[in-house]
Image (tube, rainbow, N blue to C red):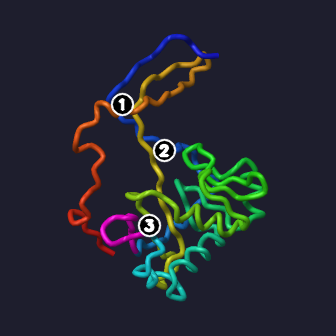
């Protein structure tokens, strides 16, 4: 049951949310960073861009990423995207979650990604899950066997929002409630796009 007492109300602070759950696997300790990619910034459109072909066996980023997913080596917030449909059904019958949000789910006979796109084939949905993120997120490409090709891809998906209210429950847990954005208070420079000329990427 919820307590009616409000613990705090915040109007201007941003809360950075990440899933603080320890994964049930252990990633390789011997990995070398080959490249860090920030998508949709400067010349980069996505992690599938041709300029990253050189990091993959077969010189093909798209096929290389698909293979990494099949090997259960594409991690989002430290949790791997299931490599096969069967693994998905066993491990995530209620859906693959990102920040406690259903991101990849099977519903009405199709695989849905972030409740926006639907796919008949699991492999296509898994690939879309790995590559369909918003601008500004970082992907890290790692080599684990010193052959200078990608074996592991990691990325962290974090969100921020304005906290409107925090309520303490009788069991000692807390509920956070988002605040609606008041566009009437928006300034002229708020929400403008960053000029890519001020961002330099090195790979």
Q: Which residue is painted at 48% across and 76% down in the image? A: 143
Label 3: state its secondary structure. Answer: strand
Q: Which of pointers 1 and 3 indicates the residue nearer the eye? A: 1
Up/down of 172 relative to 182, above or below:
above
Q: Which of pointers 1 and 2 indicates the residue nearer the eye? A: 1
Which quadrant, please, contains the C terminus? bottom left
Label 1: state its secondary structure. Answer: loop
Marks 1 and 2, Cα distance to the nearest angstrom? 25 Å
Which residue is under mark 3?
A: 140
Q: Nearer the viewer, residue 34 or 105?
A: 105
Q: Which residue is painted at 74% across and 52% down in the image? A: 107
Q: Is residue 57 magenta?
A: no
Contact (Cβ within 8 Å) of mark 1 with mark 2: no
Marks 2 and 3, Cα distance to the nearest angstrom? 18 Å
Which quadrant, please, contains the N terminus? top right
Q: Nearer the viewer, residue 66 or 147?
A: 66
Contact (Cβ within 8 Å) of mark 2 with mark 3: no
Q: Which mark is residue 182?
A: 1
Which residue is under mark 2?
A: 18
Give x and y (percent) for residue 108. Answer: 77, 52
Q: Earlier in the sequence, mark 1 or mark 2?
A: 2
Give x and y (percent) for residue 57. Answer: 53, 86
Q: Residues within 10 Å of mark 3 (few under 14, many from 20)?
A: some
Q: Residues within 10 Å of mark 2 (few under 14, many from 20)?
A: some
What span is in magenta? 35-45
Quarter residue 123 falls in: bottom right
Q: Earlier in the sequence, mark 2 or mark 3?
A: 2
Q: Which residue is painted at 56% across and 74% down in the image? A: 65
Quarter residue 78 falls in: bottom right
Q: Which residue is painted at 55% across and 64% down in the image? A: 130
Q: Earlier in the sequence, mark 1 or mark 3?
A: 3
Q: Residues within 10 Å of mark 1 (few under 14, many from 20)?
A: few
């Amino acid at each position: 049951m919820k307590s009616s007492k409000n613990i705090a109300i915040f109007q201007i602070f941003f809360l950075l949310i990440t899933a603080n759950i320890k994964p049930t696997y252990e990633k390789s300790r011997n990995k070398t960073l080959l490249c860090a990619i920030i998508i949709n910034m400067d010349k980069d459109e996505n992690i599938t861009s041709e300029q990253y072909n050189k990091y993959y066996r077969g010189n093909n980023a798209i096929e290389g990423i698909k293979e990494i997913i099949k090997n259960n080596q594409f991690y989002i917030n430290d949790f791997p995207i299931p490599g096969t449909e069967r693994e998905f059904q066993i491990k995530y019958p209620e859906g693959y979650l990102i920040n406690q949000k259903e991101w990849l789910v099977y519903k009405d006979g199709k695989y849905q990604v972030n409740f926006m796109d639907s796919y008949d084939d699991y492999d296509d949905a898994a690939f879309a899950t790995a590559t369909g993120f918003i601008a500004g997120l970082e992907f890290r490409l790692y080599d684990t066997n010193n052959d200078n090709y990608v074996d592991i891809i990691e990325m962290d998906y974090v969100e921020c929002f304005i906290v409107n209210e925090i309520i303490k429950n009788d069991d000692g847990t807390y509920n956070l409630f988002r605040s609606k954005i008041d566009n009437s208070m928006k300034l002229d420079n708020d929400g403008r796009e960053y000029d890519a000329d001020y961002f330099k990427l090195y790979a």
